[in-house]
């Protein structure tokens, strides 16, 4: 299949490109830096320097494509992530860039689109399992563009094109994941990036498992699918799993009230108990995560990082 991919050199983009090429797909991926373009060439993909906010350029770029995979994000680094203005570029990718891709796909006769999203939009479910029909947070605040982007992408299904929205849990692990470095840095003073009640569930997904889900989505029917671990952990369990894997002291949770002071209503997305199920994607495609929970995933990631730090390991 001829695939046009955005976000192809990000944390989940890189393993996604590798899996697509390995599966025999012809991949054209957006790359606006020389080093990113070089990496794509080396792995067997074709780099394309495209401004996703330029509708004409996007229209020209996807000509000949059979599928569009929109994985581009621009998540601000900690502590800038606490500032609503820092998410402007990210939200434009979810809305304006998605609109350009959908319009271009319609004009080019593209028959399949896969769009990234997140599970943080679900309302607090306590200990109950949440599927794709679960209620959303009433006041999404600064993450409202996430749902807007989903709706824009699903417009393509009106043209009988298979359109898949993947709601990812919190990305963790994998090569180049800035979040791991940030967590390790904070761990020196027993701090963390995790907020909320100790017993509230959080749903996550290892970066490579997320990439496998993107490839599997090329065979999924139109719809919204959760991409998460088999076993979501509580926030206390998640931090303890990190500490055990990396050998740090026990980490502290950030209180919900502190997050609310900064993020307002959107704080619910960071503190709600979200025990999300991946059953729909499993049943539709046969996909399953290699790491069933953060315990196994963090342990594997800690081992990988340790090997990289030992010469000739």
Image (cartoon, rainbow, N blue to C red):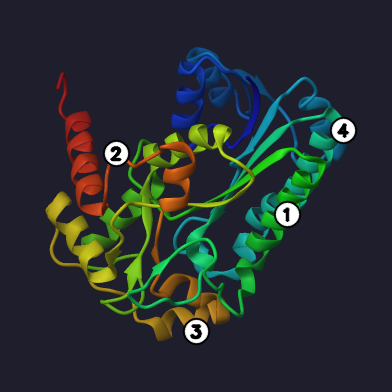
What residue do we see at 56% from left, 76% from top? 137
Is residue 128 positioned above or below 261 on the image?
Answer: above
Check if mark 3's residue and mark 2's residue have beta carbons within 8 Å: no
Going from N to C along the chain, the mark reached first, 3 or 4, is: 4
List the residue tagged with mark 1: 95
Residue 295 seen from this side: yes
Q: For marks 3 and 4, give the CA distance.
A: 45 Å
List the residue tagged with mark 4: 107
Residue 52: x and y in percent read 74, 39
The kind of secondary structure element at disc 4 is helix
Q: Nearer the viewer, mark 3 or mark 2?
A: 2
Q: For marks 1 and 3, give the CA distance.
A: 26 Å
Q: Is residue 92 left or right of residue 140?
A: right
The kind of secondary structure element at disc 1 is loop
Foreground residue among 8 and 229: 229
Going from N to C along the chain, the mark reached first, 2 or 4, is: 4
Residue 290: x and y in percent read 29, 39
Q: For marks 4 and 1, give the CA distance.
A: 18 Å
Q: Quadrant of residue 25?
A: top right
Q: Nearer the viewer, mark 4 or mark 1?
A: 4
Foreground residue among 308 and 206: 206
- Report crowding for label 3: few under 14, some 14 to 19, many 20 or more residues within 10 A (C-alpha): few
List the residue tagged with mark 2: 290
Going from N to C along the chain, the mark reached first, 1 or 2, is: 1
Q: Nearer the viewer, mark 1 or mark 2?
A: 2
Going from N to C along the chain, the mark reached first, 3 or 2, is: 3
Q: Is residue 4 left or right of residue 254?
A: right
Q: Is residue 258 left or right of residue 56?
A: left
Q: Is residue 275 left or right of residue 285?
A: left
List the residue tagged with mark 3: 261
Going from N to C along the chain, the mark reached first, 4 or 1, is: 1
The quadrant of the rendering that contains the C terminus is top left
């Amino acid at each position: 299949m001829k695939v046009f991919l955005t976000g192809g050199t990000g944390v989940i983009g890189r393993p996604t490109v590798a899996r697509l090429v390995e599966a025999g797909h012809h991949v054209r991926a957006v790359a606006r830096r020389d080093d990113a373009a070089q990496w794509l060439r080396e792995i067997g993909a074709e780099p394309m320097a495209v401004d996703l906010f330029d509708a004409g350029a996007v229209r020209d770029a996807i000509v000949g494509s059979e599928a569009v995979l929109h994985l581009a994000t621009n998540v601000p680094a900690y502590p800038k992530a606490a500032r609503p203005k820092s998410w402007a570029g990210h939200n434009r990718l979810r809305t304006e860039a998605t609109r350009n891709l959908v319009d271009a796909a319609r004009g080019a006769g593209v028959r399949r689109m896969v769009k990234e999203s997140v599970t943080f939009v679900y309302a607090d479910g306590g200990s109950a399992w949440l599927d794709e029909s679960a209620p959303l947070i009433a006041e999404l605040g600064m993450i409202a563009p996430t749902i807007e982007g989903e709706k824009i992408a699903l417009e393509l299904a009106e043209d009988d094109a298979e359109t898949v929205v993947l709601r990812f849990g919190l990305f963790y692990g994998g090569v180049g994941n800035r979040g791991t470095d940030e967590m390790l840095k904070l761990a020196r003073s027993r701090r963390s990036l995790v907020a909320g009640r100790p017993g509230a569930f959080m749903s996550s997904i290892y970066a490579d498992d997320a990439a496998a889900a993107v490839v599997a989505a090329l065979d999924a029917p139109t719809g919204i699918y959760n991409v998460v671990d088999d076993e979501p952990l509580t926030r206390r369990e998640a931090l303890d799993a990190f500490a055990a894997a990396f050998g740090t002291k026990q980490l502290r949770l950030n209180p919900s009230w502190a997050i609310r002071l900064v993020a307002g209503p959107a704080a619910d997305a960071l503190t709600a108990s979200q025990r999300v199920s991946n059953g729909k994607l499993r049943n539709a495609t046969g996909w399953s995560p290699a790491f069933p929970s953060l315990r196994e995933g963090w342990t594997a990631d800690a081992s990988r990082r340790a090997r990289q730090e030992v010469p000739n390991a």
